[in-house]
Image (cartoon, rainbow, N blue to C red):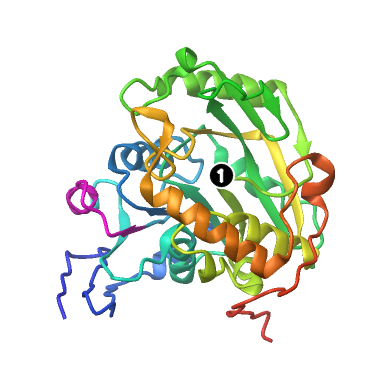
Amino acid sequence: MVGMTFGKNWIIIMSYDMEMEEYHEDMDFKNKQKITTTISTHNNVDYLKLAVKSVRQNAHYKDMPIIVHAENCNDGTDEWLEKNRKKYDLEVYIDHNDKPKGIGGGMNFCVDKVKTEFVNIIHSDMWLAPNQDLELLKLYDDIDDDVRLIASSFRIQPKIFPNDPDYRPGTVFHPVDVFGEYHHNFDSDYFDEWASEFSDSNNIVVRKGGGAGFFCKVEDFKWIGGNDPLFAPASWEDMDLFVRMQLEGYEFKMTSKSVLWHFSARGSHFTDDDFTKKSERQIKAEQDNQRKWMSKWGRMPGHDEETFVKPIHGTNVPTKIEWRSYND
């Protein structure tokens, strides 16, 4: 066993035989919060810095718990988290293993550590606009107790591909020279100003499947079983999760009152300097998981408004579902 502890609220212990322990001195104060933000990351340190900063700077609940799971990183992520854990009051898990959990498994791992009622699941290549958390929480004010709601922010993304539209439900694309498309040229102040004006002047609610990054009750995430480890390390796990939620009657809302900037699959799908070239890890994952999807569901999902929101009844539905609670 190789283990380390780095003081109050710093949690890490891991070994290469994939055992993991944790140390908490006193986390009771976390229970008094309503929301926890979680981030699962792999080799994306420059964007992770921005994501963490945006939560502490722009969240309505600025002191909310932030849980970060960093897996098999060799780009300085581990060292940055160790150095900045106290500055940003982070609950950190550093994981080096031979069988990666991937982004979906990392989400599951983080949610399992959450002590609050709600979880704000974001990616490490996102910047949250002011009050992103509060506006999602407001969506729960007027729903019945038995409604399982998945809430999502409107995503603003750089228009990095020629065939990107200006808008599709829940996503607004901007030319790359407006806010910047990289961590080093992103104008966060200008984006925050624009996002505030956008959310103030628009009140759009899209009732369809969730997007990258979403907000829900912890018990609802656990009841559906979280992400299926079948799709580790990445690709198709989010689509699989939302389809299972649709089949179980979950409701979806994406609101323009809550806004975030999504650099768009930075560090996982594409290399930072070439948007036309996918990483070898991503190419392999997409190929493998497309075959797994077909084996599980029987046909490909649609992406338009009609076919995307309809339940997809497959051949093996669903697999590897654990966790269910609601007191069973």
Residue located farthest toward the top when viewing the structure as drawn? 177
Q: Quadrant of the N terminus?
A: bottom left
Q: Quadrant of the C terminus?
A: bottom right
In this rendering, does residue 37 appear at all? no
Residue ID at (48%, 40%): 59
- On the rendered structure, is 227 left or right of 266? right
Residue 173, picture quadrant: top right
298 or 109, nearer to the observer: 298
Check disc 1 and give the amino acid type: Asp
Q: Position of residue 174 (x, y in %)?
A: 56, 19
Please check the rendered image and state whether residue 81 is part of the magenta-colored stretch, yes or no.
Answer: yes
Residue ID at (34%, 20%): 185
Label 1, on which residue? 133
97 or 86, nearer to the observer: 97
In this rendering, does residue 298 appear at all? yes
Write the start and end of the magenta stretch as one range: 69-84
205 or 282, nearer to the observer: 282
Residue ID at (54%, 24%): 161
Q: Position of residue 258 (x, y in %)?
A: 62, 36
Q: Is residue 84 above or below residue 200?
A: below
Q: Position of residue 119 (x, y in %)?
A: 54, 58
- Secondary structure of the residue carrying tag 1 is helix
